[in-house]
Image (tube, grey):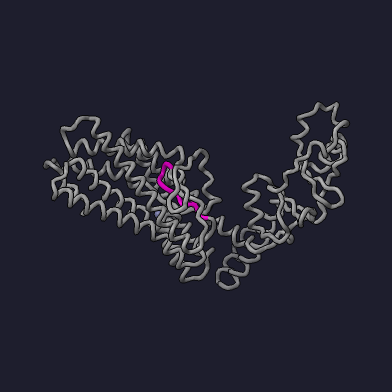
Amino acid sequence: MTARGIRAFSPRAKSHDSRALERDSLRKSTRHVICSLLPMEVKCMFTTRWRIFRLAGIPIYLDLSWLIILVLITWTLANVFASEVPRLPRLDYWVMGLVSALAFFMCVVLHELGHAIVGRAQGMPIRGITLFMFGGVAELGGEPPSAKSEFWMAIAGPIVSAVLGAIFWVAASLGNQAGWSSPVVVVLLHLAVINWLVLAFNMIPAFPLDGGRVLRSALWGISRNLRRSTYWASLLGQGFAWVLIGVGLWQLFQGPAGLFSGLWLGLIGLFLNNAARESYQQIVIRQALEGEPVSQFMNREPIIVPPVLDLRSWVEDYVYRHHRKVFPVAANGHLEGYVSTRALQRFPRAEWERHTVGEVMNHNVQAITIPPTADALTALGKMQRTGSSRLLVTEGDRLVGIVSLKDLMHFMKVKMEVENDRHDDDAGHQKTTEDHEHYVHS
Ligand SMILES: [Zn+2]
């Protein structure tokens, strides 16, 4: 359908070889544009990004790496257009390429927006949409509430791409009949094809691509077990990622022509593999920690530094004894702040005796405190955001404990072992096999 379309709209008849070459280069530039719906904990690879605008209240970000794919697609399309619409000034092809590439990325934004709006309607927090070197990512603030909502959220993006492709196709047909200039018709036609290629690539059932999400929602609907469904979908996603890496490596050894394409495929494979694994881990963490109150993990007798203590005594009696760098400062049970060894840099060692902890402590405890009733998942999120592996547990301004990342991880490990035993009890056969394996290995 698409190949015939390109031929039909081509202004001049061309050799079979050159047509095949064009189609091939077009596919190469666009088939590897992915769309991914990732939990926000997983997408932390964006370091330099700008918010460009808001659509339907959802912030759209541009990652610096997006410039790479913009240049790549502009360049590829300019070459395709040069062979399809001959005898134009060289600059025109670049303009056509750039306009198509920008329009295409607007389509990617709309595709992501499809996911985001449906997700939001299902009650999921949407943090934003980011365009980056492999395409687009919609950041989710959690997991979908049900298999059905996941299905609709996952399929919404591909539906948008399908519709956009159809709109461009109809516009190209009408334009062709109305005698629009061939550059315009060719650009519209390619936008149709590109949207459909994006649709096709993203419907591959490799989690966390859209198709993988659809697959997971089906498994989830049948098995009623989100963790197991994610496990299998993620395994398939990782398998597909390894296939991409394999094909990429093979292309690398096919001479200079395959160098770039091979490298690109390999990078996408690595990205997907990582995203699939991390998405699964995120589910495991979420299920283990959700609904477990912080009070269950906290150390109820934290080591507290009084504000009147001088710095020298603090270092010798607290820092060196307990091997920690940060301590809560409290007097009569009331939290006043926290003190970090970083504060010592302000004074030469000889002056430590003349200054107190109260002088150098940080009063801004908002970022590292949490109420005892908060759930452990919230605590973990706060630790990730602030980079602090310990949080002070407070009731009002009273310090009631300290919760550490180590404690959370330890609890998670124990809970997972217990839960896995339970799952295996359900499937008696599996338990026997695993017990046997233990026996063999030990
Ligand atoms: Zn998508």
In the rendered image, the residue lying farthest to the left is 13
Q: Nearer the viewer, residue 55 or 191?
A: 55
Percent coordinates x, y for residue 148 in the rendering = 45, 68
- Name the residue at 26% across, 50% down: 192
Using the rendered view, name the quadrant where residue 133 is placed. Answer: top left
Pinpoint residue 400: horizontal percent, then vertical percent: 79, 56
What predominant SS class does the magenta segment belong to? strand
- Quadrant of image for the C terminus: bottom right
Q: How many marks?
A: 0
Nearest the camera: 122 or 281?
122
93 or 407: which is nearer to us? 93
Q: Residue 250 lies in what quarter of the image?
A: top left
Vertical arrangement, residue 442 with respect to residue 18, above or below: below
Image coordinates for residue 128, horizontal then vertical, percent: 48, 50
Quadrant location, the N terminus: bottom left
Q: Identify the magenta region.
A: 132-140
